[in-house]
Image (tube, rainbow, N blue to C red):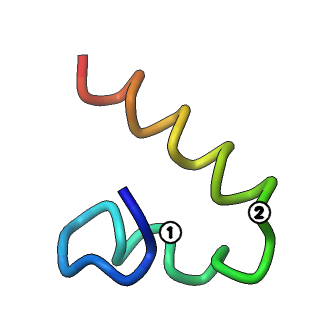
Amino acid sequence: MNCSAENEFALICRKFCTNIYAINECKISYKWNKK
């Protein structure tokens, strides 16, 4: 997953793209939310 992809994750996380820690945090949250 990355912020440039055209998908729901990217739309949610794009605002965090300047902060690598925020991106990672969002990825973790996204993984948990998908379960």
Q: What residue is shown at x 51% (from left), y 44% (from top)?
A: 27
Q: Is residue 28 above or below residue 10?
A: above
Q: Are marks 1 and 2 in contact (CB under 8 Å)?
A: no
Element at badge 1?
Answer: helix
Which is more N-terminal, label 2 or label 1? 1
Image coords of residue 35 (percent x, y): 24, 16
Which amino acid does the dot numbered 2 rest on?
Ile
Residue 20: where, in percent of width, then height? Answer: 76, 63
The correct choice, above or below, for 30 with respect to 16 in the image is above
- Which residue is at the front of the view, 8 or 18? 18
Gap between marks 1 and 2 measured at Cα: 11 Å
Q: Which residue is mark 2?
A: 20
Q: Is residue 2 above or below residue 24?
A: below
Instruction: Name which residue type carries label 1.
Output: Cys
Horizontally, residue 17 falls left or right of residue 29, namely right
Residue to which mark 1 is pinned: 13
